[in-house]
Amino acid sequence: MFQNNRAVLKRRATITLLPLYYSGPLLKKNTREKDFKNYYGELRGATLFLYTDDTQDTYLEKLELEQLKSMELASPYQKKMPTVFTLSMQTEEVQLKMDNADRGEEWRGYIMTVVKKEIPTKLQLLPGQFMKLEEVLASEQARNFLPSRPPLPRRPTFLRSPSSSSDSSPKKQDSEMPACFFSVSRQEAERMLETNPENGSIILRPSTMPNNYAVTMRQPKDSGAILKHYRVTSTSAGFVIELDTAVTVSSLKDVIAYVLEKTDYRLNPYVLCQPYDTRIEPSPLPKCVNVTHSTSKTLPRAQVKPVQYPQSKETPPPAETTDGTYVFPDPSSYNHDLNSSWRASGSFENEERIDLHRNWRGEIHHLQESNLGKI
């Protein structure tokens, strides 16, 4: 029996990863419940774990005492009367009852010590019990101790992003949820896996216990598909997959990765199929753009007036006679016409023509002399 208790304690320590401060039988009920229920409680760190009995290695419920706002006694301490006190949490109120008044005082002392981080003074305890509370207080302070670090220098202005702000909060755990997480019950998860096996075979869902999760898995076998459920416990050190040998991982994505690895990647996370479009249509044009698809019009040809150059009176070359000689005009007649035109103009605009005429007349004399030489 002693060996079994040691195995149970080791198992619980592996699952919770918290130091054990106090344990014992107690009764518990919520304000909406009528009767108390028997539990075996363990105070580990600042969390109260509730088991069916002292032989159970997996807890049924847990109370995060760090969310405790107040503790009120139903009646003052009396030696032969049970102790009942109410724990006002942030989301609910829980009543704890101990049949033994001395046990009740011990429970109240340990709870107040781990929550307030100080030993209550108004307790009906013996000196040895106060010494144990001092040990618990030292252990809890060491567990929550964070070494002081020097302040970091201010970030340079040129490295600051415009979207960064001083009141930015860290990312919530919801943003790190795997794609196969669905807020459904056990029965709904089973129905989803049975109805649409093509979508996947692993669903991560909330557990019936607060702040905990469960993995629902549809695993095909030769005899047919079977459904399995695994509890995932949230602790301060991470997430514990409660198997025969408990496994602790740092995130819920690692929980799914571990399950995939252990199933040889033959199972897939359950993901809803998203619809896809099969046609691509052009977007409408802006209203300011007017595009017509009429036939292109033929532009008329441009009518360009031909360039008119001034007509110059150039002397034609001498005509050749039938006997091989040339007929030369009388130069005096050209001089007469040129001088008359120059006189009529009354300007010196015809000087170039006069020079041309003189050059041409020299060529005529040269031709005449050459022809006379032939004769």
Image: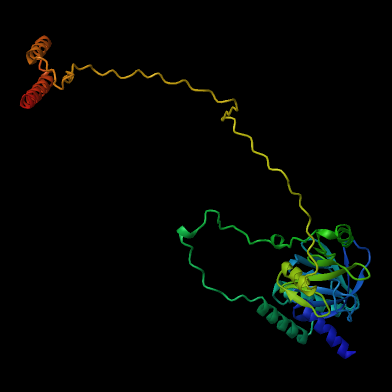
Residue 12 in the image: x percent, y percent?
Answer: 81, 80
Q: In this view, does 178 lie above or below 17?
A: above
Quadrant for the N terminus, please.
bottom right
**Residue at the image point whose x is 48% and y is 67% from the top:** 153
Residue 208 in the image: x percent, y percent?
Answer: 85, 64
Residue 48 in the image: x percent, y percent?
Answer: 80, 73
**Residue at the image point whose x is 52% and y is 72% from the top:** 150
Q: Is residue 2 above or below residue 191?
A: below
**Residue at the image point whose x is 37% and y is 19% from the top:** 304
Q: Is residue 232 visible?
A: yes
Q: Give residue 314's quadrant in the image.
A: top left
Q: Give residue 291's quadrant in the image.
A: top right
Q: In this view, does 135 lie above or below 37?
A: below
Q: Can residue 74 be seen in this view?
A: no
Q: In this view, does 171 lie above or below 262?
A: above
Observer-nearest residue: 88 or 282? 282
